[in-house]
Each structure stands twice: as structure tokens, then as C-alpha cells.
Amino acid sequence: MAIAVIWVMAVPAVGSLVLASYVYSYPGISDKIYPTLYLIVIVSGTFLMGLALCPTTVLAILTGYWWGWAMFPAVIMAYSLASLLGYFIGLSLDKNSFEALLGNYPKAKALFQKNRDRMGTLIFFTRISPIIPFALSNILFAMIKAGWKNILIYGFLGMLPRTLMAFGIGLAANSLSEALENRTDTLQLMLFITLLAVSIWGIGRFFKSSS
């Protein structure tokens, strides 16, 4: 599990550089949308994000830039499937790591056990945060056994604002370099701060009410 955590922290950054290098070398992407392309985006997005090979933000920005709103449902589906993929991979790697970590902290352990039925709230506010990496949160959810239904439902709702923000960056970009540089204007900065504040408030409220 420790190796998995290191993987999800380091590999997405490398994957982002590789993907950026590739799209700069082959910028001629057709903006025509057809059923096979939908499937390609869903499948490739699922594995790239679920295996932490590339950040979710980069894929959302590029998809918005190349194909616009017509491809947004495919991105959402890929996000949801990637969440499940990452979660189940985390479960397969986990050997009661969380139990071991909390072995010397009985109060913290009791807190999570007491609020097992409120995991959806924690998932939602974790997903809505613009600074908590998608792949890392999948591993953390697996460690606390958050439940795949909670991941699918509350994770989907929590990811929507972040996805819309990243997708909007791609839509508003006038060039591929502008999209990948992720230039921040006032509105984007305000959205970032708002999502961060809501996330901190929600996670803090979860632990405060739990304790």
C-alpha cells in the first residue's frame, strides 16, 4: 500500500508531461465526434485515471478543448469508472493498512467505525477539493473501506464541480498551449478558492460532528 501511495503521488505528474509532449507533437486531433470515439474516450480515460497514469484535470481540459460539451458525458462516465477501478485496486492491495495505522489511536479508530454510515459525506467533500489528487483519494477510500456505492454516487457528485472547472478551461482556451498551460483568470481563481473552502468546511464538519 505504501508503494501504491507513492505511485499515485508521482506517476500522474510524469504521465502529464508525457501526454503533453505527445499532443504537442501530434496536435491534429479531429473535432468530429462519432460513437467509436466516445468509446475510446471512456475506455482510455478510465484506465489512464484509474491507474493513476495521468491527472484527471489534464484529461478534462484536453477533452473540453478538442471536442467541447458533446464529449462531456463521456468524461463523466470515464471519471466514474476510473473511481471504481482505482478503489478496487486499492482494496486488492490493502492488507488492513488503516487498521494498523490506527492501532495506537483508539479514539480515531472508534471515530471511523462510529461513522461508517456517513462515509458518503466524507467522499463528497474530499472529491470536491481541487487540491486532493483523484488517484490518492481512491487509495484512501480503499483503506477506510468507504464502499463502492458511496464512491460511485457521492464521488460522482463531488467530482462534477472540479470536472466542470477543468472542462471550462479547455473550452475557453484559444490554443492547445493555452489549454495545457492552464492559465488562471479571476473567475477560475474564485471557483478554485470556493471549492477549496467548501471542501475544508465539509471535511472539518465531518470530523467535528463525529467526535
Image (tube, rainbow, N blue to C red):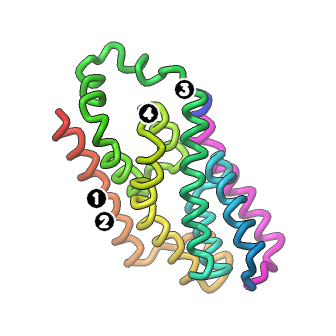
Q: Which residues are magenta?
A: 5-31
- 43 relative position to 50: left or right: right
- 194 relative position to 144: left or right: left
Answer above or below: position of 49 versus 76.
Answer: above
SS label for mark 3: loop
**6 or 47: nearer the eye?**
47
Give the spatial CA distance, label 1 vs label 2: 5 Å
Q: Which numbered disc covers residue 197?
A: 1
Residue type, numbered disc 1 = Ala
How many residues crowd around disc 3 within 10 Å: few (fewer than 14), some, or many (20 or more)?
A: some
Give the spatial CA distance, label 4 vs label 2: 28 Å
Q: Was residue 10 drawn as part of the magenta stretch in this picture? A: yes
Q: Give the residue pinned by disc 2.
A: 194
Q: Nearer the viewer, mark 4 or mark 3?
A: 4
Q: Quadrant of the C terminus?
A: top left
Give the spatial CA distance, label 1 vs label 3: 31 Å
- Percent x, y of residue 33: 72, 82
Residue type, numbered disc 4 = Lys
* The quadrant where residue 58 appears: bottom right
How many residues crowd around disc 4 within 10 Å: few (fewer than 14), some, or many (20 or more)?
A: some
Q: Which numbered disc covers residue 145?
A: 4
Give the spatial CA distance, label 4 vs label 3: 10 Å
Q: Give the residue pinned by disc 3.
A: 94
Q: Residue at x 63, y 64 (%)?
A: 59
Q: Residue at x 28, y 51 (%)?
A: 200
